[in-house]
Image: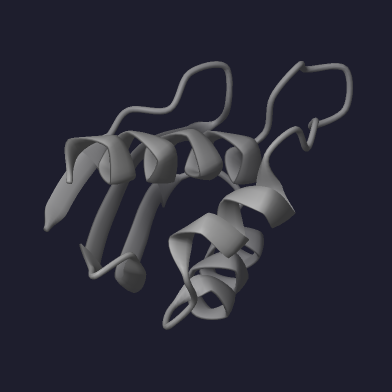
Amino acid sequence: MRIQYKPKGVCARMMELEMEDGVIKDLKIQGGCSGNLQGICKLVKGRDAKEVIQDLKGIHCGPRPTSCPDQLALALEQALAQN
């Protein structure tokens, strides 16, 4: 399953996610801090989406109430709900 998620309240503009049987197969993030987001994409590939949600949900970026990792967790929750 492929989904596109438009993050809110962060610098990233779009998250494109591919999952199969609850496992993240591919992730691309447009915008935001390039190096950090490339690292996140590599670290989550091949991992169970539920585990990644537990790891990333609730992370803040400075004074913001969310972050790119937190938005990724929300995107994964949405993808699991659609499946």
Q: Is residue 83 above or below residue 36?
A: above
Identify which residue is drawn at 57% across, 16% down.
9
**Quadrant in which residue 11 is drawn:** top right
**Quadrant in which residue 43 is drawn:** bottom right
Residue 18, position as x, y percentages in the image: 22, 63
Q: Does 10 sit left or right of 14 as displayed?
A: right
Q: Is residue 67 above or below residue 76?
A: above
Q: Is residue 9 above or below residue 55?
A: above
Identify which residue is drawn at 78% across, 17% down.
64
Identify which residue is drawn at 80% across, 31% down.
60
Q: Does 15 sit left or right of 66 as displayed?
A: left
* Quadrant housing the N terminus: bottom left
Residue 75, position as x, y percentages in the image: 39, 38
Q: How many marks?
A: 0
Q: Does 79 sit left or right of 64 as displayed?
A: left
**Quadrant in which residue 19 is drawn:** bottom left
Q: Does 14 sit left or right of 76 as displayed?
A: left
Residue 20, position as x, y percentages in the image: 21, 70
Residue 77, position as x, y percentages in the image: 42, 38
